């Protein structure tokens, strides 16, 4: 993390990782100059993480004017891991903890099909983390027979009480059967075993109602601004 007077920026020298703003403290007199100073970083996997409480109120307009593309609104949700109920996967589906390259490839292949875009960069990043810092990552596959039908991961943040839940995309034919809930509770139990207290999710509208029903609270909303 790089901290300046107005921004906190995530940077990485790892291939296929990402750079971007994760916190800002701006107003109408500082926003344009700060964005202009940040613009040389607008390349590759760049993302400015905008929160609905961020100032100034027209910050999204200013980010778009700077050439960034506005993504889909997401709910920032948090729950205590211990409060997440246990949910078994549906009959015929098993949850498998990924420990090797083959599993990472299978997980990102599921993401490709579910989300309709390539996750090659994510694949390379997860493979690097698996090799270099496996204690900061959990990846889980939901498998029906020999077919992966959903995939999700947990990112751990050493020195904090938080872990982030990501992914959870499920193939169309397997939606509505409780797989997502099972993946959330499975990861909650694994996080507890690592001493994590809180789980955080940036939830799309399809996931937010499910998470609310199982104990997550919406704190705010966030929107990614990227290069498109």
Image: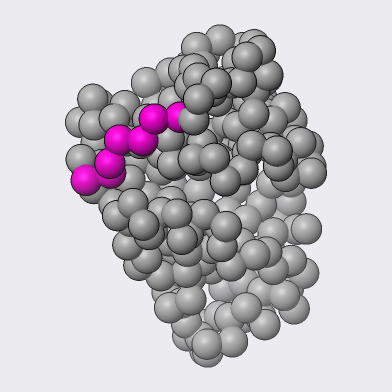
Residue 153 lies, in percent from the top left, at 49, 32
**Residue at left 39%, top 30%?**
88
Visible in this render: residue 173? yes
**Residue at left 66%, top 52%?**
46
Out of 114 and 134, give the one closest to the viewer: 114
**Residue at left 58%, top 81%?**
59
Magenta extent? 83-89
Asked where in the image residue 197 lies, by quadrant, the reply is top left
**Residue at left 33%, top 51%?**
214
Residue 185 lies, in percent from the top left, at 35, 36
Out of 209 and 53, give the one closest to the viewer: 209
Residue furthest toward the front?
91
Quadrant housing the C terminus: bottom right
Task: Name the main secondary structure of what is drawn in magenta.
Answer: loop
Residue 52 lies, in percent from the top left, at 48, 76
In the image, taking residue 138 as reference, residue 227 lies left or right, namely right
Is 85 included in the stretch rendered in magenta?
A: yes
Q: How is the image coloured?
A: one colour
In the image, taking residue 30 as reference, residue 83 lies left or right, namely left
Is 108 included in the stretch rendered in magenta?
A: no
Out of 96 and 154, give the one closest to the viewer: 96
């Amino acid at each position: 993390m790089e901290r300046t007077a107005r921004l906190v920026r995530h940077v990485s020298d790892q291939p296929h990782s990402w750079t971007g703003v994760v916190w800002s403290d701006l107003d109408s007199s500082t926003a344009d100059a700060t964005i202009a100073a940040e613009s040389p970083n607008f390349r590759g996997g760049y993302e400015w993480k905008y929160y609905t409480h961020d100032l100034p109120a027209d910050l999204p307009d200013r980010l778009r004017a700077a050439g960034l593309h506005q993504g889909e609104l997401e709910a920032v949700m948090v729950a205590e891991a211990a409060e997440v109920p246990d949910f078994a996967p549906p009959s015929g589906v098993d949850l498998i903890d990924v420990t090797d390259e083959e599993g990472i490839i299978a997980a990102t292949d599921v993401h490709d099909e579910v989300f309709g875009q390539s996750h090659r960069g994510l694949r390379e990043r997860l493979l690097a983390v698996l090799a270099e810092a496996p204690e900061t990552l959990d990846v889980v596959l939901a498998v029906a027979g020999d077919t992966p039908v959903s995939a999700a991961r947990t990112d751990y943040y050493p020195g904090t009480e938080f872990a982030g839940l990501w992914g959870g995309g499920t193939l169309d034919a397997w939606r509505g059967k409780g797989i997502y809930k099972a993946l959330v509770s499975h990861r909650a139990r694994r996080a507890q075993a690592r001493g994590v207290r809180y789980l955080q999710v940036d939830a799309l509208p399809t996931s937010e109602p499910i998470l609310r029903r199982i104990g997550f609270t919406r704190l705010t909303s966030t929107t990614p601004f990227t290069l498109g």
